[in-house]
Image: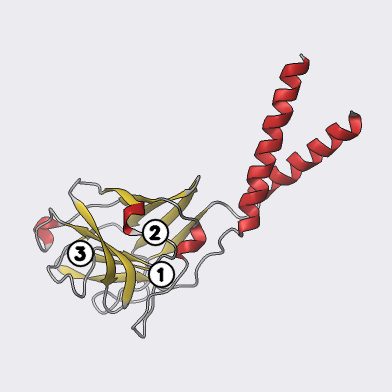
Amino acid sequence: MKFSRSLLSAAAAIGLSSMALPALAIDYTLDNGGSAFATPGNYGTVSLTQDGTSVDFSITLAPTFNFVTTGNAISHVLFGFNATGVVAGDITGITSGNGGTFSVGTGATGQPFGDFTFGIYCTSCSNGGPGATTPPLTFTVANATLADFAFLSTGTKTPAFFTADVISGATTGQVGATGTTPPVPEPGTYALMFAGLGVVGFMARRRKQQA
């Protein structure tokens, strides 16, 4: 019995210790101002958080910056991102600081950052400054892990992980997250974490039954 309890305790410790390795959240900096804003810069943050089998997105912008619809959907997406193993129906719960109605497009362009897998569009926003969308922009992607979004755009000399169409004062343009991707948790990290939690739950039930 003591040996069995020791094994269970060790398994729990190993599983739970995995949660202290890479955090189940990563941030990307919108560090490139494209052709409209001075580069390099810090124009905002794209935060991804693992929430069970989903990933929560929260995009914040630097002071004086808002999201904008420029009226040129062919080359300017409100927010563009890359993903693998994701379909449009997985992307839900899109909200912004001042509300609005949003849609998801498969395939989007945010020049000069090229082509992205998905685009978020504001269908209720008027063009330009009067229709600006205030941050944060948030949404959830189901059936995904953090590693599913660590891909650069294509079709450009300035690839990016994410892009946003923004406005500051009277200036509009795309900003992008072009820096090196932060480390993402390996699949084994998730397995160890959930195994540890399972062992802890099992031990708790055994103690309750023996009480």
Taking the image as shown, residue 13 lies to the left or right of residue 48, namely right
Q: Please tell me whether residue 208 is drawn above or below residue 111 in the rendered image.
A: above
Residues at badges 1 and 3 in contact (C-beta under 8 Å)?
A: no
Residues at badges 1 and 2 in contact (C-beta under 8 Å)?
A: yes
Q: Determine if residue 187 is in view.
A: yes
Taking the image as shown, residue 91 lies to the left or right of residue 204, namely left
Task: Report the residue marked by disc 3.
Answer: 167
Residue 62, position as x, y percentages in the image: 31, 59
Q: Which mark is residue 161?
A: 1
Q: In which quarter of the image is residue 121?
A: bottom left
Q: Quadrant of residue 77?
A: bottom left
Query: What SS does tag 1 mark?
Result: loop
Q: Earlier in the sequence, mark 1 or mark 3?
A: 1
Residue 26, position as x, y percentages in the image: 49, 57
Residues at badges 3 and 2 in contact (C-beta under 8 Å)?
A: no
Q: Which of 106 and 140 is in front in this view?
A: 106
Task: Report the residue marked by disc 2.
Answer: 46
Query: What SS does tag 2 mark?
Result: strand
Q: Please tell me whether residue 196 is drawn above or below residue 180 in the rendered image.
A: above
Q: Determine if residue 20 is in view.
A: no
Three-letter code, disc 2: Val
Q: Quick one: quadrant of the C terminus? A: top right
For disc 1, the neighbor class at 10 Å (few under 14, some 14 to 19, many from 20) is many
